[in-house]
Amino acid sequence: MSQNDSQAILSVQRLSIEFGAKRVVDDLSFALYPRQTLCIAGESGSGKSLTSLAIMGLLPKQAHTPSGAIVFENRDLLSLAERERQQLRGKDIGMIFQEPMTSLNPLMTVGQQLAETLRRHEPLSRQAIAKRCREMLEAVRMPQVEKRLTQYPHELSGGMRQRVMIAMAMLCRPKVLIADEPTTALDVTIQAQILELMRELQQQYGTSLLLITHDMGVVAEMADQVVVMNQGRVEEQAPVRQLFATPQAAYTQKLLAAVPVLGSAGIPEDLSQQPALLEVRNLSVRFALRSGWFEAGKNVHAVENLNFDLRAGETLGLVGESGCGKSTTGKALMNMLAYEGSVKLLGQELNGLHGDALQRVRRDVQMVFQDPYAALNPRKTIFELVGEPLLIHDRLPNAPRRERVAQLLHQVGLPADAMARYPHQFSGGQRQRICIARALALNPKLIIADESVSALDVSVQAQVLELLEQLREEQGLSYLFISHDMAVVERICHRVAVMYGGQIVEIGRRDQVLHNPQHAYTKRLLSAVPLPDVERKRDFKSLLQEFRTPSPIKELGFVAPVQQFVQVSEEHAVAT
Amino acid sequence: MSTAVALLRRPTVAVSLLYIVLVVVLAALAPWLSPFDPSEQFIEGLSMEGAPLAPGDIYWLGTDLLGRDLLSRLIYGARTSLFIGLVANGMAVLIGTLVGLTAGFLRGWLGSALMRFTDLMMAFPALLLAIALSAIFQPSVWIVALVIAMVNWVQVARVIYSETIALSARDFVAVERTLGASSLRILFSHLLPHLLPTILVWATLGISTTVLLEATLSYLGVGVQPPTPSWGNIIFESQTYFTSAPWLVFIPGAAIILLSLAFNLVGDALRDELDPTLQGRS
């Protein structure tokens, strides 16, 4: 470590940020050294993003900084005039935001946006600017640079947009790059690419990186120094090895214990003798693509020929990256969209059901969504929300309904007085518990959990996973657990099915699929998961090449070739 | 009940309600409260040169061009204007909400048909439509209200339509479907409460435009027939004498503005009181 023999390039000294009387960042200090990476880790509400905005001078108007200093090259940024800060922004301090789509101007080409940034800070000729832009895009390993320069943001994939964002931030060779959750909105393989890219650029340009993240895996992969924040305060500050090996603060210990670690789960309980609850055969979902009046139509093949069984009492994980068709599968099973093929619940065919017959099936199959706040009508009380299925299906009168709702709330670990309150009065984890209580109201046999814990902080996530597990055992539930997070899937599922391009490419027991992957895509996916283990830093270089995903848009009448499966072991099958 | 109490505790709401009640009482008790007959032309109500009198001792708010008492005309005019404002605008909001909600929720061919019809109505010049309708039917206050509703519902339908589409895409609506809720239940129990703020804004803001549209129609001779006074036609009768007799325009104008402001403030407060998310965490 060269920390002692060089001077900090950016140091935050006893910084506090307040919104009115509410202190959201309290007495925060840290120092970033040249060529180093400092990670600020924390859960939502920890004040980590506000800190980055304070450094950039982009705090919202209502916020003020009653004390502290942010020193960059011997100047206190907080005392600079707005004009001087503008000159620093982009030139000496670059920033990357979480959402690459909303951070790029949709009406300007990539080339125009890059050139604009450069022109603002450096008096260069037209040719020199064009040259620098091209070089920068090459540095971020953008394929087909000339073509990209003339494209608009919507023509690029999410990963490529984030590369453009990085190129834009790095264009003036800033001394400090601030990245606020730069990979949170991205798929895991794209995340690995972006992380690798940031490592390379740091080497090449000698930039100091301030990385803000909630993901301890990303911290372990990237950080030299770590600041752990919680509710505006620093819980712990340590070099990365020390932090992971011997965490000092109780909060850090709790946080690290809650992080699911891929590869840690053993062989699950054997359920292979259980009868099948759900049998899915040749399930396909197509969406017609609207085109002009005189053009031939096209179809989006979202799900193609899916076959799997879900056994009673089992949790089956459906994993894959965005666009692989996993959520569409969940919706088809809920009869929320039209599909082809057969889905049988306890031997009863679900395809084509409507009216009363569908209503009866709805009792047995319930769904828990990703965003609990969006899934709860904000104008209804918890009693109305959780009691609604009882009202719809059983016309249960007020008094017994109240009793049942209290019982359900108790089951999911919420106090009975929650009934009179509204969704916005609860935290994210509590809201998801409310959604689970509602799904349980009719004693279903199967719950489809679509990314149900993805929006939650890790410590809350662990609690909700525990609750799901406990409910499964108590009530004999089965889950179809749809997720993009391998580590979470490994923790809760008995079996795992990996989806790619609308098809299952590998299915088997969790230890078989996740510890001994056979399909190229499963391998690629697993190699991209960052591990919260400093001793096992991953090399993402091989992932930098774009993996071609076949387009799901097909001409009318297209028939997908039938998949051939090889049986690796008794329960483990892989597509060839 | 608690909502009503909370509402009255806001000073602006209390004052607004007071004004609305005052107008309603004046309108209801017009024959007893107005000092003169609103249609009677007084010789002494005009000056020697034949000009209307400014506000004074006998005619508190002055007289109009024909020597009629302005205060009496205002009080009687409140009857027409209040009726038109509430009934015509109420009908417009009701029709607009139903059309927008149905089209936005059902989509499909019915939704498209409804919205294309709405677009057609929107593209049609509103005044021409109003004149045509008034020409077909015998003018009466009810017909005028109906005509205004026919012209005004389109904007409401457009706004409600797009809001319904946005709301239908939210997760909690998807959840309701998975729970097996019927369309009617989703519409009335889950979508309508979210549309209430918009509906309230239209219901209150629309009153002033309605009163003014009635005035326009009266001016063109297809609205409320003279000598029946309405706030709108008082302004239009006198607008050319604006410089010599400004009170004839200002006083009824102020009455209209205050009325729509009062409704608007009450509507705003009502919207806030009815939204549980604005009451903070506890």
Image: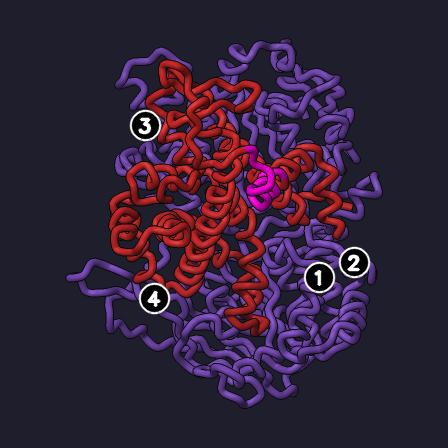
Chain colours: A purple, B red
Measured Cα–Cα span from mark 2 to mark 1: 9 Å
Neighbours of disc 2 within 10 Å: few (<14), some (14-19), many (20+): some
Q: Amino acid at mark 3?
A: Gln
Q: Position of residue A497 (x, y in %)?
A: 53, 70
Determine which of the numbered discs, if any, sits on residue A418 in the image.
Answer: 2
Q: Residue A186, relative to residue B97: is it above or below?
A: above
**Residue B27 highlighted magenta (yes or no):** yes
Q: Does residue A144 lie above or below B112 as drawn?
A: above
Circle 4 packing at 10 Å, graded few (<14), some (14-19), many (20+), is few
Q: Are marks 4 and 3 in contact (CB under 8 Å)?
A: no
Q: Which residue is mark 3?
A: A112
Q: Position of residue A256 (x, y in %)?
A: 74, 48
Judged from the image, the secondary structure of the residue bearing numbered disc 1 is helix
Q: Residue at x 41, y 54 (%)?
A: B142
Foreground disc of the pair 1, 4:
4
Q: Mark 1 sits on what residue? A: A434
- The quadrant of the picture occupied by the N terminus of chain A is top right
Label 4 sits on residue: B110
Q: What span is in magenta?
A: B22-35
Q: Nearer the viewer, residue A206 or B217?
A: B217
Look at discs 2 and 4 and give the one toward the viewer: 4
